[in-house]
């Protein structure tokens, strides 16, 4: 039986390595294909909200993933929630939001969930998705988010160490939460540093997403 083809849709190159490493650890049998359009994140950062034009661009990106034979599609950027919803409704293969699996794991830890984010335009859509997930799962849950300034800028410049340090420095502000989520695939690089600065569970999106996609496909 051929390996399932999982197409990874990236809107920024800094998300590529974390999910590649997660697949290597947790589902090496899968065939992964990377599609990157980093103009999406650049243009999204310039917009105060996700426009219909941006949604259409993202949906076209997802349609191409399906046309090249995807058995499943995993989105690695968290700033395009409504566009992903449209893809889910349109395509006949599993389409997984970047943080759905992490949300499941977080709610299992308790009601008060903290989140460390580095890309401002994603915070609103992620908060909406979290609140929707809480309603659908009928589990109590509240999210408190800290946006870590300059961290994404340093990572894009190739300075992962400073990126991780900046994120870990803000983590103690969420030390009373039941769990802390690292908002983006790119943020998962800071997991070790964050775990060293707090005693609460620290959750990352890539590992949880790979496990969830495997459940949906196998």
Image: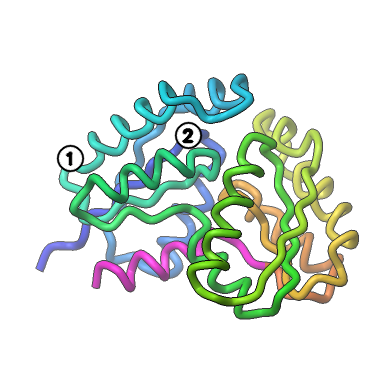
105 sits to left or right of 144: left
Q: Residue at x 42, y 70 (%)?
A: 211
Q: Relative to 64, is 137 on the left or the right?
A: right
What is the chief secondary structure element of the magenta stretch?
Answer: helix
Residue 135, compared with residue 70, is above or below; it is: below
At 87% across and 72% down in the image, what residue appears? Answer: 176
Q: Is residue 53 left or right of residue 131?
A: left
Q: Is residue 201 above or below residue 156?
A: below
Indicate the colouring scheme: rainbow
Q: Secondary structure at mark 2?
A: loop
Residue at image position (45%, 67%) is: 25
- The spot of residue 84 in percent (x, y) is 40, 44
Judge by depth and name the residue closer to the eye, 196 or 203. 203
Pick whichever, 152 or 59, lies toward us.
59
Q: Position of residue 207 (x, y in %)?
A: 50, 65
Q: Secondary structure at mark 1?
A: loop
- Image quadrant for the N terminus? bottom left
- Residue 136, horizontal then vertical, whole percent: 48, 68
150, above or below 2, in the image = above
Label 2 CA crowd tier, 10 Å (few <14, some 14–19, many 20+): many
Q: Quadrant of the C terminus?
A: bottom left
* Mark 1: few/some/many CA within 10 Å (<14, 14-19, 20+): few
Question: What residue is disc 2 on?
Answer: 11
- Residue 208 falls inside the magenta stretch: yes
State yes or no: residue 84 in magenta. Answer: no
Residue under label 1: 68
Instruction: Name the residue: 48% across, 22% down.
Output: 39
Q: Position of residue 63 (x, y in %)?
A: 24, 36
Q: Quadrant of residue 140?
A: bottom right
Question: Which residue is at the far left?
Answer: 1
* Range covered by the magenta-colored residues: 203-218
**Distance between mark 1 and mark 2 Cα atoms:** 18 Å
């Amino acid at each position: 039986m051929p390996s399932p083809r999982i197409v990874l849709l990236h809107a920024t190159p800094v998300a590529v390595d974390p999910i590649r490493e997660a697949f290597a650890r947790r589902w090496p049998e899968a065939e992964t294909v990377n599609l990157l359009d980093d103009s999406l994140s650049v243009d999204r950062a310039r917009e105060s909200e996700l426009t219909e034009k941006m949604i259409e661009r993202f949906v076209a990106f997802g349609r191409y993933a399906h046309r090249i034979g995807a058995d499943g599609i995993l989105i690695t950027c968290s700033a395009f929630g409504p566009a992903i919803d449209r893809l889910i409704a349109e395509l006949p293969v599993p389409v997984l939001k970047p943080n759905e699996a992490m949300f499941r794991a977080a709610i299992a830890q308790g009601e008060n969930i903290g989140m460390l984010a580095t890309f401002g335009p994603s915070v609103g859509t992620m908060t909406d998705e979290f609140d929707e997930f809480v309603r659908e799962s009928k589990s109590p849950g509240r999210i408190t988010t800290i946006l870590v300034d300059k961290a994404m800028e340093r990572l894009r410049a190739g300075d992962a160490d400073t990126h991780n340090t900046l994120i870990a420095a803000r983590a103690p502000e969420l030390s009373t939460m039941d769990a802390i989520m690292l908002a983006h695939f790119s943020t998962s690089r800071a997991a070790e540093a964050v775990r060293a600065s707090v005693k609460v569970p620290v959750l990352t999106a890539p590992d949880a997403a790979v496990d969830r996609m495997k459940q949906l496909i196998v």
